[in-house]
Amino acid sequence: MIKQTFNNIKKTISTASSDAYDDASHLASRTSHLASIFKGDRVVWLIFLILCVVSLVEIFSATSTIVYRQQNQWGPILRHAMFLIGGVGVILLIHNIPYRYFSSLIFVLIASIILLLLTPVIGTTVNGAERWISIFGFTIQPSEIAKISLMGTVAFLLSKQNGMNDSVLFKWMIGLMVAVCGIIAMDNLSTAVLLFGVCFLLMFIGNVKITRLLKVAGAGIAVVVLFVLLLKVIPSDWTNSGALNRVGTWQNRINSFGAHKELDEETYFTITDENYQVAHAKIAIANGGAVGVFPGNSKARDFLPQAYSDFIYAIIIEEMGLVVGGIGVLLLYVFLLIRAGIIAKKTEKLFPKYLVLGSALMLCIQAFVNMAVAVNLIPVTGQPLPLVSRGGTSTLITCAYFGLILSADRFGIGKPRRDVAHPVSESDEEKPKKQTVETIDKLEEKIEFEVIQV
């Protein structure tokens, strides 16, 4: 009887071990399946997921004014969540495409230029600016499409420099930058300056001759000085309506930014139409302090007109505090920039290297500009906080930048060679496939990029 009891116990333990092994194997297979879907650098994925969580929490809190107008508590957050889910789909699509195919962004750039030219004619006006186009019921922002396509095109042209065609490629890059940024600047000056600055930094990283860059910088400074002088002398009557209506907005932002230096204390702390957004952003930051008032308890969200977009960083600080919200969100973009630099350093070819750096610079510089506006370091620009602010086109395009970074990480970093001393046997079916891939790679390396100068 003792022997039978021992056998039963042994059988029970064996069955339990087998079940535990099956559960562990099932969990491992599910983990492996998820890893096969979400490929690429894990740090970049982690930063993306954290920013998505911050965005969902803060958008749900900051859209109180929209909820009040629409009488729908879940409508704004569900809309934003759908765009984030769509953005994940964009990343999964793009990060499975080899980076070499993104050289075709030049065709997307041409399409975006056409849309930019059509925007003043058929565009939709929002907050006094015609930056959106409605197509089949969907509203898109052509400037966001132009940003990613121009950055990708400049990265591709930089990768094709060989010492003999540098002058021609430089003229093409400057010509495209001036044309695209010039069109965008007519109604969105801050986006044009941001785009031109990122492409200029990318050219500096891409070993463009310093003398050429200095000439461009000198011309740019001259244009800025001339533009500021024109803003000072243009009569206000000319900017009330018509083609110069945005000039009045630029004048007010520049004048109000430095006005506190000439005002007394009482006038400075008086909230007016000119300093309404900045004043309430300062109130939100002061109310948050070091630890915040906890998500959902913001007071400034009911007064800031763009609490869920341009000034969402102030709401983040108010609700999550300066330590977790202010410094934490800032560090996420800093870590993204650092990680992109590490990925770019590991890539073997120039195109993915410049693609990673251009994408990271576009995201991080835009984030730093948004944060600087919220704390009143620079004039109001209207730039959203990437992936955190509410928006359709901007959210999807931001996810596309993440997809480009992950694609370059997957396909741009060379795989370690196999150990010659212990070669791995290959089946007869795998050998032709490998030879075909190697042949295609060799042919792609032999292709030379030629520009026909008209």
Image: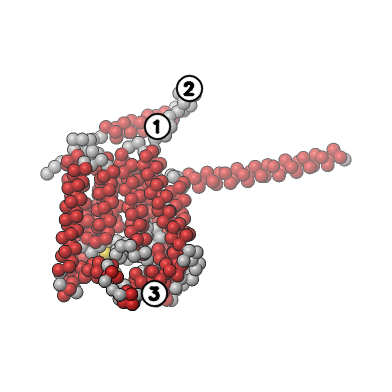
Sequence order check, earlier mark of 2 and 1: 2
In screen coordinates, is 51 left or right of 152? right
- Which of the labelled discs sits on residue 433, or is there none? 1
Q: Residue at x 54, y 46 (%)?
A: 31
Secondary element under disc 3, as helix, strand or loop, is loop
Q: Which residue is mark 2?
A: 421
| Mark in front: 1 vs 3 | 3
In screen coordinates, is 306 left or right of 9? left
Secondary element under disc 1, as helix, strand or loop, is helix
Q: Position of residue 74 (x, y in %)?
A: 46, 70
How far apart are the alpha carbons under marks 2 and 3? Answer: 70 Å
Q: Position of residue 153 (x, y in %)?
A: 26, 47
Sequence order check, earlier mark of 1 and 3: 3
**Circle 2 crowding by C-alpha within 10 Å: few under 14, some 14–19, many from 20:** few
In screen coordinates, is 231 left or right of 421? left
| Mark 2 residue type | Ala
Labelled pair 1, 3 in contact (Cβ < 8 Å): no
Q: Which residue is mark 3?
A: 303
| Mark in front: 2 vs 1 | 2
Q: Position of residue 157 (x, y in %)?
A: 24, 43
